[in-house]
Amino acid sequence: MSKQIDLHEAMLSVMIGESSLSQAADKYQVSKRSLYSALRFAKQAPEQRQQHLQRVREQLMANIANIDSRLAQQTA
C-alpha cells in the first residue's frame, strides 16, 4: 500500500474507535506525528468551511442591503 492510503486507513481506524492513535500508527506503519496532524486537519476542515460560509453569507446580505438601498433611492 502507498503511504497515503496507509495514513487514510489509520485515520479511519482512529475515527471509528477501532484503535488508539498509537495502535493505528503501529498497525499501518505511519508516524504518530503524521497521523495526529492529519486527524487534526480533518477536524478543523468543517470548522473552516463553516467560517467561510458565514463570511459569504454576511457578504451576500450586505450586497442585498446595498441593492435595496439603491433601488429605494432610484424610486424615491
Image (spheres, rainbow, N blue to C red):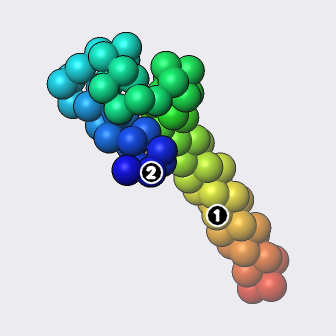
Q: Whole-percent x and y of residue 18?
A: 18, 24
Amino acid type at circle 2 is Ser
Residue toward you, 26 or 60: 26
Q: Is residue 31 left or right of residue 74?
A: left
Q: Residue at x 36, y 21 (%)?
A: 26
Relative depth, front residue between 30 and 8? 30
**Relative to 31, does residue 49 appear above or below in the rendering?**
below
The C terminus, quarter of image = bottom right
| Tag 2 near tag 1, CB within 8 Å | no
54, above or below 11, in the image: below
- For the point 64% across and 63% down, the residue is 60
The single residue placed furthest to the bottom in the displayed view is 75
Q: What residue does disc 1 label?
A: 60
Q: Position of residue 67 (x, y in %)?
A: 72, 74
**Mark 1: which secondary structure?**
helix
The amino acid beneath tag 1 is Leu
- Name the quadrant containing residue 29: top left
Neighbour class for label 2 at 10 Å: few (<14), some, many (≥20)?
few
Give the percent coordinates (x, y) of residue 39: 46, 30
In the rendered structure, the answer to whether residue 55 lies left or right of residue 50 reads: right
Query: In the rendered image, is residue 47 in sight?
Result: no
Q: Nearer the viewer, residue 41 or 36?
A: 36
**Residue pointed to by mark 2:** 2
Helix, strand, or loop for circle 2?
loop
